[in-house]
Amino acid sequence: METTVLVVLACVALVAWLLWRGPGRTARLRARYLRALHQPPAEAEATLARQLAKVRGRFPDRSEAWYLEWLLKDLARDRR
């Protein structure tokens, strides 16, 4: 009985983790960054494109989500 409960809990945790890490994560991070810029949408997109290009040059071979997380942390650090 206990083993079954543990297996079910592990499966639920795995599904939750996969959903959190899935492709929607990049879209959520992108939207969060654009909101944090407090700029009109066209300007925010241009700023994001510039920043992504700069970070990609500095840290090649990372995931899109990694770059967006880096930019969000950098933006928060700048605002302190």
Image (cartoon, grey):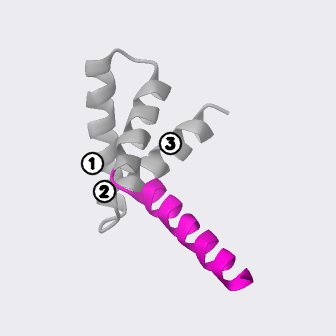
Q: Position of residue 65 (x, y in %)?
A: 39, 54
Mark 1: amino acid: Ala
Question: Relative to residue 2, is residue 61 depicted above or below?
Answer: above
Q: Secondary structure at mark 2?
A: helix
Magenta segment range?
A: 1-23
Residue in view at x 46 percent, y 34 percent:
32
Q: Is residue 56 left or right of residue 17?
A: left
Viewer-side residue, 24 vs 14: 14
Q: Do tag 1 and tag 3 residues touch (Cβ < 8 Å)?
A: no
Asked which quadrant contains residue 77, the reply is: top right
Q: CA distance from mark 1 to mark 3?
A: 15 Å
**Real-space CA distance between mark 2 and mark 3, rounded to the nearest whole angstrom:** 14 Å
Q: Earlier in the sequence, mark 1 or mark 3?
A: 1
Residue that mark 1 sits on? 53
Q: Is residue 63 above or below residue 49?
A: below
Position in image of residue 13 (x %, y %): 58, 66
Q: Is residue 16 magenta?
A: yes
Quadrant in the picture for the C terminus: top right
Vertical arrangement, residue 36 with respect to residue 39, above or below: below
The circle drawn on residue 72 is 3
Q: Amino acid at mark 3?
A: Leu
Q: Residue furthest top?
A: 40
Badge 2 local density, few (<14 within 10 Å), some, or many (20+)? some
* Cα distance in 3D space between marks 1 and 2: 5 Å
Q: Which residue is mark 2?
A: 56
Pick whichever of labels 2 and 3 is earlier in the sequence.
Answer: 2
Query: Is residue 40 rendered to the left or right of residue 79?
Result: left
Magenta-drawn stretch, dominant element (helix, strand or loop) = helix
